[in-house]
Amino acid sequence: MPSPEKPARWRRSSFSNGNGGNCIEVDDSCPGTVRDSKDPNGPRLRFTPDAWAAFVHAAVDGEFGDV
């Protein structure tokens, strides 16, 4: 998790613009950590590197439909 020595660096996909704010942000300082962009102080989810890679590949391959 982020610490004072390694603060969070949240990033949102450039593809999320114009979708009504329905997106997640990823923490580049802690791979596999995501949050809801509409609730930046809310819960954060953390995934193992393998689980995160599987999710990203599934999204790129269209396994979740047209979202």
Image (cartoon, rainbow, N blue to C red):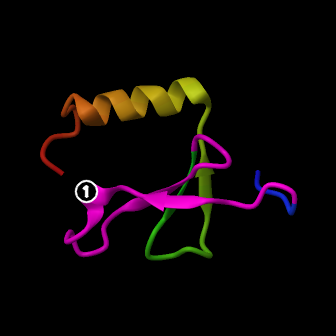
Residue at 87% in and 57% down: 5
Q: Judge whether residue 27 is colored magenta.
A: yes
Asked which quadrant contains residue 43, the reply is: bottom right
Crowd around label 1: few <14 · some 14–19 · many ≥20 (10 Å)? few
Residue extent of the magenta highlight: 5-32
Q: Which residue is mark 1?
A: 15
Relative to residue 36, is residue 32 drawn left or right?
Answer: right
Image height check: is 62 above or below 40? above
Image height check: is 52 above or below 25? above
Q: Report x, y in % for residue 30.
A: 67, 46
Residue at 46% in and 28% down: 53
Asked which quadrant contains residue 49, the reply is: top right
Residue extending furthest toward the left: 66
Residue at 18% in and 51% down: 67
Residue at 44% in and 76% down: 38
Q: Report x, y in % for residue 21.
A: 31, 73
Image height check: is 6 above or below 53? below
Image height check: is 33 above or below 35? above
Q: How many numbered circles does the render carry?
A: 1
Relative to residue 6, is residue 38 drawn left or right?
Answer: left
Q: Report x, y in % for residue 52.
A: 50, 33
Under tag 1, what secondary structure?
helix
Q: Amino acid at mark 1?
A: Phe
Q: Report x, y in % for residue 44.
A: 61, 59
Tell me which secondary structure the magenta stretch mostly adopts.
loop
Relative to residue 17, is residue 50 drawn left or right?
Answer: right
